[in-house]
């Protein structure tokens, strides 16, 4: 797959990821264990797909642009770790209040990654086809 196609697929999955994360936070607040479990199954699939796409994207990176891409992806990994912990606490009955910072972390990470991806777009599709 071409770099821009990979990035487009990743952006699409990131939108889905954000929505699922929002749902999971709400279900954790409500202590709705069955919905948390179901949503986590879906978000894990999306995250695995995003990880695969990110690995393919990283094959195209050069030293000049790899750090910003990798740092942006690291924020997504951190958000995933946080939501896993929150879900685990809810599933084990230990959740108190949903951390409000999680939503911000997910939004900041995905916004940062989207910005980095958009900034790297070539000015012409002809460059990609070559």
Image (spheres, rainbow, N blue to C red):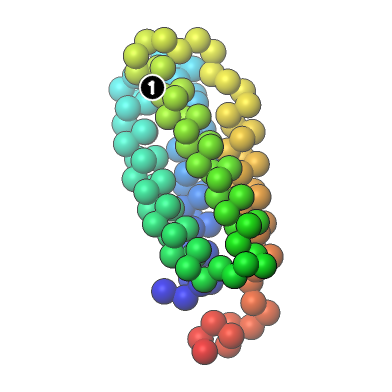
* Circle count: 1
Left or right of 32, for residue 124: right
Residue 28 seen in the current view: yes
Say which of 24 and 2 sits in front.
2
**In this figure, which residue is indicated by the disc labeled 1?**
88
Residue at 54 percent of width and 13 percent of height: 97
Return the x and y of residue 8 as percentages of the image width and height.
Answer: 51, 64
Residue 53, compared with residue 97, is above or below; it is below
Q: Position of residue 6 (x, y in %)?
A: 47, 66
Q: Residue furthest front?
A: 63
Q: Is residue 6 visible?
A: no
Residue 26 location, x and y as percent?
A: 49, 24
Q: How many C-alpha atoms fall within 10 Å of the one at disc 1: few (<14), some, or many (≥20)? A: some
Say which residue appears at 47% left-offset and 47% top-offset: 16
Front-most of 28 and 52? Answer: 52
Q: Residue at x 64, y 77 (%)?
A: 122
Q: Is residue 95 above or below residue 63?
A: above
Q: Point out the image quarter for the N terminus.
A: bottom left
Foreground: 67 or 18?
67
- Quadrant hosting residue 44: top left
Secondary structure under tag 1 reads: helix
């Amino acid at each position: 797959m071409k770099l821009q196609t990979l990035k487009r697929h990743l952006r699409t999955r990131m939108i889905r990821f954000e929505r699922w994360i929002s749902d999971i936070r709400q279900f954790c607040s409500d202590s709705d264990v069955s919905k948390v479990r179901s949503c986590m199954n879906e978000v894990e699939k999306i995250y695995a797909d995003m990880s695969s796409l990110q690995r393919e994207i990283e094959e195209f990176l050069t030293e000049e642009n790899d750090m910003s891409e990798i740092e942006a992806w690291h924020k997504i990994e951190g958000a995933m770790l946080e939501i896993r912990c929150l879900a685990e606490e809810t599933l084990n009955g230990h959740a108190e209040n949903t951390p409000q910072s999680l939503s911000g972390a997910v939004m900041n990470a995905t916004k940062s990654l989207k910005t980095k991806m958009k900034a790297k777009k070539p000015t012409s599709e002809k460059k990609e086809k070559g």
